[in-house]
Amino acid sequence: MSVTTPSLATREVYQILRDIALGIRNLQRVSEPSWTEIACGSMTVQADGWILTLRNEAGALDHLISCFSPDGRVYALNTHHHYGTDPVALMSTWEHAQLLRLLGAA
């Protein structure tokens, strides 16, 4: 018998990103960013028990690689949702800019 980890919905993960951008959740780095304005890379952060790994492409926040909720549910870009909708793509221009600013200062 195989046990599957419950998955997180794209909209649920988007709401976490939105809460971070709005300052409702406190953002802390788990890893140092492995990106610069000209290089690609990733950064892992946590916000109120949520662990998120984000991908940067040449100084721009590109997509969410993974998200783990405090209750053990998981969002993973490579295995999630038949249309591959990324929570970062749901963010408004302001939310996106605010999150990128916070990631630089986190």
Image (spheres, rainbow, N blue to C red):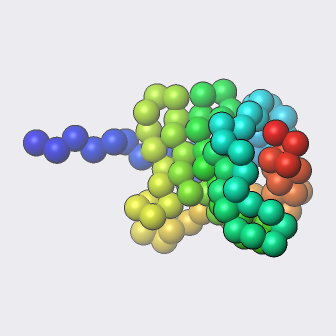
Q: In this rendering, is residue 29 above or below 103? A: above
Where residue 66 appears, as percent x and y from the top left, is 53, 51
Is 49 on the left-hand or right-hand side of 75? right
Task: Kindly identify the residue that appears in the image at 22 percent across and 41 percent down.
Answer: 3
In the image, residue 89 above or below residue 54: below
Q: Please identify the quadrant where the C terminus is shown.
A: top right
Q: Which of 39 and 102 is in front in this view?
A: 39
Q: Nearer the viewer, residue 27 or 37?
A: 37
- The residue lying toward the viewer, choosing from 90 and 48, is 48
Residue at the extreme left of the image, as rendered: 1
Q: Where is residue 98 in the image (x, y as percent from the top left)?
A: 87, 50
State which quadrant residue 16 falls in: top right
Residue 12 occupies quadrant: top right
Instruction: Name the residue rendered at 71%, 63% in the picture.
Output: 56
- Relative to the observer, which residue lies in front, 55 or 89? 55
Report if residue 94 is visible in the image.
yes
Quadrant for residue 88, please give it. bottom right
The quadrant in which the N terminus is found is top left
Instruction: Please give the count of numbered marks on the rendered protein.
Output: 0
* Residue 19 visible in the shown view: no
Say which residue appears at 68% left-offset and 33% top-offset. 47
Residue at the image position 70 percent from the left and 68 percent from the top: 40
In this image, 38 relative to 10: left or right? right
Residue 87 % position (x, y): 63, 57
